[in-house]
Image (cartoon, grey):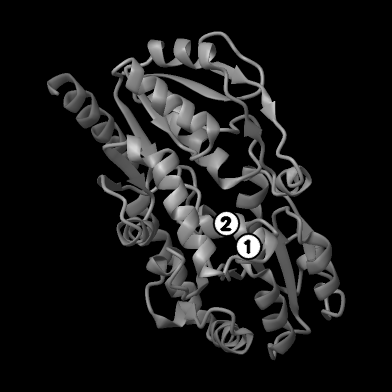
Amino acid sequence: MRILLVLDQFDGANNGNTNSARRLRETLIRHGHEVRVAAEGDSRPDDKYGFPLYHLPIFDKLVTAQGFTFASRDREKMKEAVAWADVVHVMMPFALGRSAALEAGRQNKPVTGAFHVQPENIWFSVHLGNFKPIIDFTYFGFRKYVFQYFHYIHCPSNMIRSQLEKHRYKADFRVISNGIEADVQYHKNHKDPEFEGKILIVMSGRYSGEKRQDVLIDAVKKSKYKDKIVLFLAGQGPMKAHYEKLCSDLPNKAVMRFLTKDELQRLFGMADLYVHTSDAEIEAMGCMEAFASGLVPIIANSPRSATPQFALDERSLFKPGDSSDLAAKIDWWLSNEDERKRMERLYAQEADLYRIDDCVKQMEQMFTDEINRVRNS
């Protein structure tokens, strides 16, 4: 198949959506398909249709701090991109994605969509993530703006599928994980000198309101092991300065920085526990890669997050936003090392349910079903 992936940002690897798109493209190519991308940036022959950068008035600085960019529309270029493809897969619900969906309709080309942008991800950045009317309105807006044009919608989790059904989306929903790469396996590394003799607790994710790193910082302060814990918050985002201030009175200096894939894997191999505090999450690849690497996760049991589905039992769940409950779970796992090491192996085995080759095969079936639907309509 000739598959066109449409998303605002593809170059660089500094956010989960971009990383998922890059992994999808690489795996589809490895499976024998031709894949091109329509995204912001320069064009590349036989690889990418580049679109101009779009500057969002007022919020441009905030968008950039989140590690994201928007693409502007160019109808002629999109016409060329869609004409090349056998199927178009729209991965972001913004202007470029709508342009691709409309152009696919004009050319009677198969087109599918993916729901990767949770409305809470947008509104927590301006402290409105818990304001239900604006969240509901954003679901409605996404549906009317772009998702009404798709017969098939890829949902990375059952949680987001239930949200779409709740908000009256009408489609054939395909629940398919974004997938864990084959080289992410159980492994243990010697700790760097700065972490020797310390307990290393890790969380990976943007420094933004919905991720709730503040809960983890507060939990470490309440832990009976606080004098031995080093907290590593891997990521970037607009709340970095705020979190640095919260970390300033930890007994051991916290580490906050963005890591490449290889650096993150090395960190997971050194760590003792992984914690995921997010209140809103469509899938949480960072958590998946952590337990695939052999870390027991402790996950916020939030109804707006898909991540609790990965917990093998209640010991890996805590009340969302409750730092005391999280501290108790951290202390239990650190006090029961033999059980933690046993569960590390079970979590690593659980990751085999989400391997990317199997997930992409399901994506290929969705693309084939859409091609056949259009052909027979």
Dot 1: within a 10 Å radius of its alpha carbon, few (fewer than 14), some, or many (20 or more) residues?
A: some
> From this viewpoint, is residue 72 visible?
yes
Distance Cα–Cα, label 1 vs label 2: 6 Å
Please state if 212 lies on the left or on the right of 167 as rendered: right
Please state if 21 lies on the left or on the right of 198 as rendered: left
Q: Is residue 75 above or below residue 154?
A: above
Nearest the camera: 189 or 349? 349
> From this viewpoint, is residue 186 visible?
no
Please provide percent x and percent y for residue 374: 20, 23
The residue singled out by tag 2 in the image is 121
Q: Is residue 217 above or below residue 332?
A: above
Nearest the camera: 234 or 268? 234
Please provide percent x and percent y for residue 136: 46, 61
Please provide percent x and percent y for residue 19: 55, 40
Name the image quarter holding residue 1: top left
Q: Is residue 24 above or below residue 215?
A: above
Nearest the camera: 348 or 260? 260
The residue singled out by tag 1 in the image is 124
| Cβ–Cβ under 8 Å for marks 1 and 2 | yes
Nearest the camera: 9 or 358? 9
Name the residue located 33 percent from the left edge and 15 percent from the top edge.
Answer: 107
Please provide percent x and percent y for residue 344: 47, 68
Q: Secondary structure at mark 1?
A: helix
Q: What is the number of the mark on residue 101?
A: none
Name the residue located 38 percent from the left edge and 57 percent from the top edge.
Answer: 160
Name the residue located 47 percent from the left edge and 73 percent from the top edge.
Answer: 302
Name the residue located 55 percent from the left edge and 55 percent from the top edge.
Answer: 286
Residue type, label 2: Asn
Residue type, label 1: Phe
Dot 2: within a 10 Å radius of its alpha carbon, few (fewer than 14), some, or many (20 or more) residues?
A: many
Image quadrant for the C terminus?
top left
